[in-house]
Amino acid sequence: MKHPSTRLVFDYWEQKRGQRLAPERSDIEPGPIRAALGDTFILGRDPRGGHHFRLAGTRLCALFCRELKGAPFIELWAASERDSMLRQVAAVSEESTGFVAGVTGRNMDRATIDLELLLLPLAHRDRNQARLLGVLAPLVAPYWLGANSVRDLTCGSVRHLSRDTLHVRAPRLVPISGNGRLRRGLVVYDGGRS
């Protein structure tokens, strides 16, 4: 996760879910994630299928130069990406596993913007009322942000966030035994040309 908003929301979501698959919507309070609220959104399940925006932050709305509340989430995506994104969103909703993805958007002048998308499940007793918590934030804000709307999002790399992959530690490196000595955090071995 590259964007500070993505990391903040994910860490808060992790804290709130504890040992559960996902926290409930009522567990999520805006105060602890206030720095990320402009990039944050909540999706609700649409009775006709798909998901629509129930809430959308101000920076997110500025990306698209319009209020997103009530708009279908899938409308933001290029036609070629919609089936794939519908499957990704359905997996988050049905399997209670989130994902983070690299996303590219284009404006009317065909200028591109790199974004990071985070989508996380929120539990509800009635599966038909399930909500999704998300972040969509630009990695670097372009000069035209808010003046020229982003359209036709395309998805790049996707990383699913299952419990098994979240807490994998890197292997611990152990110096080879021998005549090495520690110097400024490095192991130095004597040697050289003969």
Image (cartoon, helix red, strand yellow):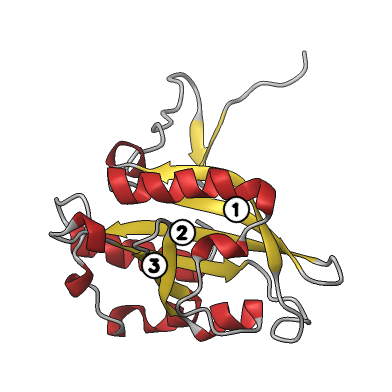
Vertical arrangement, residue 57 with respect to residue 20, above or below: below
Q: Position of residue 123 (x, y in %)?
A: 21, 59
Q: CA distance from mark 3 to mark 2?
A: 12 Å
- Please say if the residues under marks 1 and 3 sit with CB atoms less than 8 Å apart: no
- Please say if the residues under marks 1 and 2 sit with CB atoms less than 8 Å apart: no
Q: Amino acid at mark 1?
A: Gly
Residue 98 seen in this snapshot: no
Per the rendering, the mark at residue 39 is: none
Number of numbered callouts drawn: 3
Vertical arrangement, residue 130 with respect to residue 4, above or below: above
Q: Amino acid at mark 2?
A: Leu
- Please say if the residues under marks 3 and 2 sit with CB atoms less than 8 Å apart: no
Residue placed furthest toward the front: 48
Q: Regarding mark 3 in the picture, which secondary structure is present there?
A: strand
Q: Position of residue 40 (x, y in %)?
A: 44, 74
Other residues around mark 3 within 10 Å, as few (<14) / some (14–19) / many (≥20):
many
Q: Regarding mark 2 in the picture, which secondary structure is present there?
A: strand
Q: Residue at x 35, y 78 (%)?
A: 33
Residue 22 or 130: which is nearer the viewer? 130
Mark found first going from the N terminus, 1 or 2? 1
Q: What residue is shown with label 3?
A: 43
Q: Nearer the viewer, mark 3 or mark 2?
A: 3
Residue 58 or 168: which is nearer the viewer? 58
Q: What residue is shown with label 2?
A: 118
Residue 17 or 84: which is nearer the viewer? 84
Q: Residue at x 14, y 51 (%)?
A: 19
Q: CA distance from mark 1 to mark 2?
A: 9 Å
Q: Residue at x 47, y 81 (%)?
A: 57
Q: What residue is shown with label 1?
A: 102
- Name the quadrant containing residue 112: bottom right
